């Protein structure tokens, strides 16, 4: 899978390999994950937050190319 973050207006790409994990959560660095490989990928997503705060904040897709 490919994890794409928007950092200071630039896309920062990292590859998540089978068995690897990654942590996201900076409110000023939105991100999305894609699977461009030939096999299906599964991701387990968990949230740790404070009651009443949103787990996800939708962004305008124009930020990403």
Image (cartoon, rainbow, N blue to C red):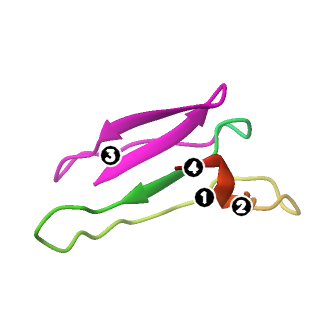
Q: Quadrant of residue 51?
A: bottom right
Residue bounds of the magenta highlight: 1-25
Q: Please tell me which of labels 2 and 3 falls first in the chain.
A: 3
In the shown orientation, is residue 18 left or right of residue 34?
A: left
- Residue nearest the observer in this picture, 64 or 49: 64
The residue at the point 47 percent across, 63 percent down is 45
Task: Give the mark nearer the N terminus: 2 vs 1.
Answer: 1
Q: For mark 1, what is the residue?
A: 47
Say which residue label 4 marks. Answer: 64
Q: CA distance from mark 1 to mark 4?
A: 23 Å
Marks 2 and 3 close (CB-CB < 8 Å): no
Disc 2 versus disc 1: distance between alpha carbons? 7 Å
Spatial distance from mark 2 to mark 4, Cα to Cα? 20 Å
- For marks 4 and 3, the one nearer the N-term is 3
Estimate the spatial distance between the alpha carbons at disc 2 and disc 3, rounded to whole Å: 19 Å
Q: Where does the image place residue 21, in percent across and percent down from the top left?
A: 32, 46
From the viewer's side, name the closer residue of 44 and 4.
4
The residue located at (35%, 65%) in the rendering is: 43
Identify the residue under disc 3.
Answer: 21
SS at circle 3? loop
Q: Earlier in the sequence, mark 3 or mark 1?
A: 3
Element on which disc 1 rests: loop
The residue depicted at 19 percent of the width and 74 percent of the height is 40
- Residue name at image x 16 percent, y 62 percent: 37
Classify 10 Å Cα crowding around label 3: few (below 14), some (14-19), many (20 and above).
Answer: few
**Marks 2 and 1 close (CB-CB < 8 Å):** yes
């Amino acid at each position: 899978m490919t994890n794409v973050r928007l950092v200071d207006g630039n896309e920062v790409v990292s590859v998540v390999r089978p068995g690897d994990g990654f942590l996201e959560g900076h409110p000023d660095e939105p991100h999305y994950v894609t699977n461009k490989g030939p096999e299906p990928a599964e991701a387990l997503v968990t949230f740790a937050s404070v009651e009443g705060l949103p787990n996800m904040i939708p962004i305008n897709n124009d930020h990403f190319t």
